[in-house]
Amino acid sequence: MNRRHLLKTLASSLALPLWADGAEWRSLFDGSTLKGWKSTAKSPHSKASGHQTAGNWRVEERTIFGSQDTPGNGGLLITEEQFGEFEVSLETNNDFGPDSGIFMRCTEDGRAYQCLIDYHEGGTIGGILGEGIWKRRGVRNYTFGKSPDVITLNDNPEHPCPVLPESWKSFWRIGEWNEVRARITDDPPTITTWVNGVQIMQHTEPASVHPAKGHIGLQVHGGDKFVGIVRYRNIRIRSL
């Protein structure tokens, strides 16, 4: 093997993630029932019901539907199983209006690292938030306008938005299914997100401030501002 070929081989191997071998995807949703999932009314999103109910979660057409159960009352749907280092993928076709997200290492009272699925004016998809962990706004690189075909880029020198506003209409399929994927590794954690296969954001926490293992959760936000239905299907995970 000549030196040039050796260097090329080494570079290729270093570019592969450490979990590339043996990391198999498995389904978290059977398409018919909420087996393996449970709702929790312990988060602030269920405050309107006095933490008695956690939103309306149901299965229709091989899809998980979520909405507020009474005006202003949302909640979380979380896996019964807990996970540490993993990658999770799903398809979403939410109404433009609800505030939602993928919760990672989630506690039953809703503290988690969140891949934002804030599909509303002023929201973003693929941004990262420490829900109940941070006392600051989440990190993002774009924001929705009054309709889902309009985005404004945010100043984020470390992770600029990879999709230009003029390309967003063809990149994001309005009214159709889009894939959102998130990965969390290590402690302090590094969180990476993708939308339709394109990496949107990556963030590394400076310190360990949250349990290194927890549930995966889906959110219906409480309050009267974010109203509508969220829809999720083809939910998969692979442990890293």
Image (spheres, rainbow, N blue to C red):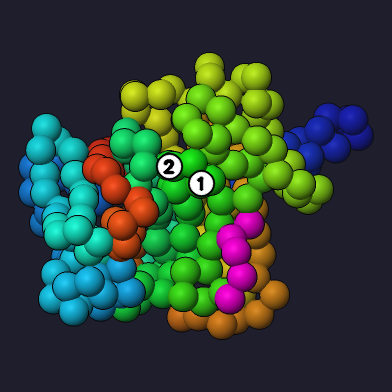
Q: Position of residue 122 (x, y in %)?
A: 53, 46
Give above or below for 55 relative to 233. below
Residue 160 image position (x, y, % from top left) = 74, 41
Query: For the point 45% across and 48% down, which residue is it?
Result: 118
Badge 1 amino acid: Gly
Q: Position of residue 60 (x, y in %)?
A: 10, 38
Q: Are marks 2 and 1 in contact (CB under 8 Å)?
A: yes
Please name the amino acid that badge 2 sits on: Tyr
Q: Which residue is mark 2?
A: 119
Magenta residues, start to end: 135-139
Give the residue at mark 1: 123
Type of secondary structure dominating the magenta stretch:
loop
Quadrant housing the N terminus: top right
Q: Of 197 and 127, which appears nearest the observer? A: 127
> Taking the image as drawn, is residue 126 in sight?
no
Rendered view: 114 above or below 148 = below
Q: Quadrant of residue 120?
A: top left
Marks 2/1: CA distance? 6 Å
State the residue in front, 68 or 25.
68
Q: In this view of the protein, which residue sits in the foreground, 24 or 2?
A: 24
Q: Residue at x 17, y 73 (%)?
A: 49
Q: Is-magenta flag for residue 31?
A: no
The answer to whether one can see residue 160 in this image is yes
| Quarter where residue 36 is shown | bottom left
Label 2 SS: loop
The residue lying at 63 percent from left, 57 percent from top is: 139
